[in-house]
Image: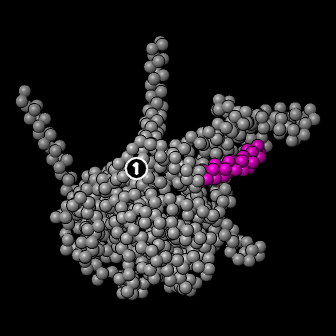
Amino acid sequence: MRAEAKLGLILLLTPLLLWLSLLILIPHVDMFLVSLRERVGVNEYRISLANYLTFINEPLYLRTFVRTAVMSTIATIITLLIAFPVSYYIAKIARGRVQSALFLLCLVPFWVSELVRTFGWMILLRETGLISNLLQYTGLADGPVEMLYNDAAIMVGLVYTSMLFMVVPLVTTLESLPDEVVEAGYDLGGSWFSILREIIIPHAAPGIVSGSIVVFMLSLGNYLTPTMLGGKDSLWFTELIYSQFIVRFNWELGAAFGFLLLGLSSAIVWGMLKLTGQTLEKTMG
Amino acid sequence: MRHPRTICLSSITISVAMIAAPVSAETLRLLTWGGYAPEDVVAKFEAETGHTVEVTKSNNEEMIAKLRATAGGGFDLAQPSQDRIAGPQEEFGIYKPIDLSKIDATLFIPSMLAATQENTTVGGEVYGVPHVWGTSGLVLDTSMAGMVQDYADLCGEDVAGKVSYRLKRPTLIGFAFSMGLDPFTAYGDEAAYTEIMEQVEAKLIDCKPNVKTYWGGGDELMGLVRSGEVVASMAWDTGGWKLNADNPNITFVAPASGALGWVDTFVLPAKGRADDAAYDWINFVMRPEIAAMITAAAGNFTASQGADEFADDALKARYQASFPPEAIDNIKWYPPVPAGLEAIEGGVLDRVKAAN
């Protein structure tokens, strides 16, 4: 019996292990080795930390990373602030078909590709776009208004792109909150604010944390939205990695950047978990 | 006992014959630019030779990056520009030499064939033959930005906020020329080249407030110019001519310091598996009447001898309007880029992009 169970376990684990080792572990090890190479001449390489030192010594790269991280954090907070009331309404107030319909509405934009969604925003925001024309038509603006190619446009795109990934975990956790608990809170004389603070948010904490982690990582690793909506000031860390690999043929530096992104973003998530007193086990379990 | 072996042998013979048979009809995996392999040309080629063509559209950097990732595999024929062959070949060894005896040299304009061969020779072997050529310069709405004569004029007051260019190496080179510098002679000298690039960097950072956005793809630029959001930009000649067909005010202008001339070539990736089909394709598309079909699709002229006769008159008229004879003599052709220059340019481009 035990041997059979063991065999079953091995068979069940094999696809997962193959997936992990072939598609994640081996490419990462290879990439790490590339990041340790320094080009000294045509087809001459030596092992060194030069690529990592470039990141530290060139203020531009460090600044770009900080900018990316800060903007991703802001995007995460805005997404949370917008998604929380929406999720609460879907989970607690809406009933039956309205509930499913609202949930579906959050889902529908994700049936088209990210490229199309971003393009939609470009059509709305550009100088000759819908909003600009509407403002001129209603007399609120004298001339064409350019709303594209700035940080606010990037932020709009990021929040829109990641909304679903915040709503889903929040709805799931909020649905598991019994209505009686909220009612008991009111019976005991709590105001809506104290109930939100003492009952709803603590209960939803795992959903908030897991949603925030996903949104933060998606924003940090986003390439399309910052590049298309940000225009000339779009500099984003993933764009740096792309250009090192594709435009500059500098795989070594690109690989080092990739690892720095992995390490630094993990550190930020870990730091945030510590700061909020949450653990990954609690969130995922 | 011998019987089964005979069967075995004969079945091997049959299977060998079956493998050998399709050699005359191969699948050609072509890595090229948009417009260089129009559907009607592909259909004609497939009907005539029996080969199948799979087209992947790309650009210079992506072509090299793709071939580098597979050490020259995955494609049977690629079309990088002639200045991007010698450097990557020395560094990554992603191409294989061209067997010139399999190419019909009479189909090519002789001077262009010779120049490309010279620029793509590494270790005594020729790696490229020319296909499509063109220039990059200025695309202007002449009713709004007639005062722009050169790249540096894009930084002028009159066009503030209505300018666009790419943040790529042609922009660096173009600005260097319009500032009176000569980046091409400094190609071999890293220190001198760095110094030129530093001056260009300062200029581009100064110029940044003038720029609406840095365009990434041809379609993006078309949209910007067509909507009037951009009135002056740095772009390819064919983009300007296409826009000219819709709006006669917009056209391609060769800058005073000289348009930058490029030649896209044919190269064989190192691990290409269908060389015969590749040679067939080259000899097919260089026929004057086929080359004219490609000119019609891509908007650029080819290195095919005699294809001009078949070209569209409207396109010829636009070409002549943009290029008076002295502008043709003034075209700056890209010399081969030595390995390693991209790193210097990359730093400059990153810093310009990050500047506020």
In the picture provided, is B151 more to the left or to the right than A200?
Answer: left
Q: Quadrant of residue B35?
A: bottom left
Q: Where is residue B31 in the image (x, y as percent from the top left)?
A: 35, 59
Q: Nearer the viewer, residue B161 or B216?
A: B161
- Which range of residues does the magenta coloring cover? A63-90
Which residue position is annotated with label 1? A39
Q: Main secondary structure of the magenta part?
A: helix
Q: In which quarter of the image is residue A203?
A: top right
Residue B217 shows in the view: no
Q: Where is residue A273 in the image (x, y as percent from the top left)?
A: 68, 36
Q: In which quarter of the image is residue A194?
A: top right
Rendered position, B287 above or below A218: below
Rendered position, A4 above or below B159: above
Quarter of the picture containing the C terminus of chain A is top right
Residue drawn 25% across the image and 67% down it:
B117
Q: How crowded is mark 1: few (under 14 residues within 10 Å), some or many (20 or more)?
A: some
Q: Is residue A83 inside the magenta stretch?
A: yes
In the picture provided, is A129 more to the left or to the right than A179?
Answer: left
Q: Is residue B41 inside the magenta stretch?
A: no
Residue B82 shows in the view: yes
Rendered position, B118 above or below A285: below
- Residue extending farthest to the top is A1
Q: Which chain carries label 1?
A: A
In the picture provided, is B9 more to the left or to the right than B201?
Answer: left
Residue drawn 87% across the image and 41% down it:
A192
Residue drawn 55% across the image and 42% down it:
A262
Callout 1: SS: strand
Amino acid at dot 1: Arg
